[in-house]
Image (cartoon, coloured by chain):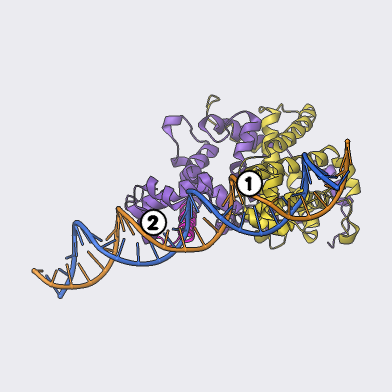
Chain colours: A purple, B yellow, C blue, D orange
Amino acid sequence: MTDPDDLTARARIRDAAMRHFGEHGFERATIRGIAVEAGVSLGLVRHHFGSKQELREACDAHLAKLLGKLNDQVPADLAELTDPETSVAANPVAAARIAVGPYRDYLVRALVEGGVAPLFDAMVEAGADRLVADDRRRPDPPTVEPKVRAAIGAAMALSITVLHQHISRAAGVDILSPAGDNLLARALIDIHSHPQLSLDEARAALDRLPAEGN
Amino acid sequence: MTDPDDLTARARIRDAAMRHFGEHGFERATIRGIAVEAGVSLGLVRHHFGSKQELREACDAHLAKLLGKLNDQVPADLAELTDPETSVAANPVAAARIAVGPYRDYLVRALVEGGVAPLFDAMVEAGADRLVADDRRRPDPPTVEPKVRAAIGAAMALSITVLHQHISRAAGVDILSPAGDNLLARALIDIHSHPQLSLDEARAALDRLPAEGN
DNA sequence: GCGAGGGCTATACGCAGGTATAGCCTGCTG
DNA sequence: CAGCAGGCTATACCTGCGTATAGCCCTCGC
């Protein structure tokens, strides 16, 4: 976002494209609109990126690079990304929101219509590692591979971003705003510390399932 | 889906539209393509539904009606929707998959780009009711309104459908297929019966949060 | 039998927007 | 200075697609 050469026209075009794609979706966004917002001519967009499709791929790549970087230093970011202006401190939820913020809409679009697969897979990988460690401490051995559970976990984590408009409407609070950080954090802590199913219920549910096979 | 008058051209157009919108997205889908698939002329689409936008709204309405009906009789469906052909029996996950199946892609699109808000809100309402009942049995009183937790829960539930392509890829199994029903059900049971955070960890996390306010 | 209405088709219009071309201007290198 | 490369603009082209119009044909009521 604040790379030294991010003031080049090329970077401005890319950023404008990410905003437009995120806001309107790939189809509805127009090269002309992107060019206007970037303050360049229509032809220059085509000059730098060959076609609309290639422009999109460049955006995907850029997002992946950004979030990859972010992913690598989550711990550092958590400490560092404190934003004095909005009085959020030591709240991982707020940190994540701020970090992803500018690219949130684009990320959501990309997730739903393919693309950014590597990003998701990285999240799964990280989650699976954590699960493997946690599983050792479990009295009951899990019957499902860590990777599968991690994939579902990653989807659930992302669902807050992906469906934030619905969550916010239903909850009556903009969940992805400074005002919502605390609420969201508390809700997540509550949800993740209180199982929906008791172990007994879980066993009963498992027994009701049809025999292994498919 | 199997209404008596669902063989009318109007219904065929609507169904074709839902397929096209779901598969290609609203912008990329063309009225012409829909007309061809429905086996009618271009003009007839416009005759029945005034414009592309109105066609879309009709699709939204139809989906809401279908899923609303489904929602009302979930218990009945769970018993009834057993599909002998695919050997799924008494598996709620399979039942849900089969019920939503034909409209899955459309549902996902609609969820992400607005629309179908009432559907989501209904899920939240139902979830909140359940939470209120469960909360009474909790030793520690929840600090977050049921509605907020229910909204997040609904999003998490839907995330499996919305992000199924990523989950399936990462897990190496098509999670929304007969072959995946059992795996998905077992994974969900495991996840929902094993808290990610212990109560102690939860308390510690809560303490680390900045003071109430925002 | 005949007028009317509605399901349906064929054809045309208009334009938005992706793609393509031609060329300007500035700066660098030999 | 010559000349080239590359960032950049202006303009034109043309296809695809939403929208609009005109009218056919069949059925039903009188």
Q: Position of residue B125 (x, y in %)?
A: 74, 31
Q: Residue at x 62, y 41 (%)?
A: A163
Which residue is label 2 attached to? Answer: A45
Magenta segment includes B132:
no
Judged left or right of residue A14, residue D23 is right
Magenta segment includes A64:
yes
Q: Which mark is residue B52?
A: 1
Q: Position of residue B82 (x, y in %)?
A: 89, 52
Looking at the image, can residue B49 be seen?
A: yes
Q: Name the front one of labels 1 and 2.
A: 1
Looking at the image, can residue A140 be seen?
A: no
Answer above or below: position of C19 versus B193.
below
Kindly report the distance in space between the C-alpha atoms of the residues bearing marks 1 and 2: 30 Å
Q: Residue at x 39, y 50 (%)?
A: A35
* Residues packed near mark 2 inside 10 Å, few (<14), some (14 to 19) or many (20 plus): many
Amino acid carrying mark 1 in the image: Lys
- Mark count: 2
Q: Which mark is residue A19?
A: none
Instruction: Check whether the beta carbons of the residues at disc 1 and disc 2 lie within 8 A of each other.
Output: no
Please report, as a chain letter, where disc 1 is located: B
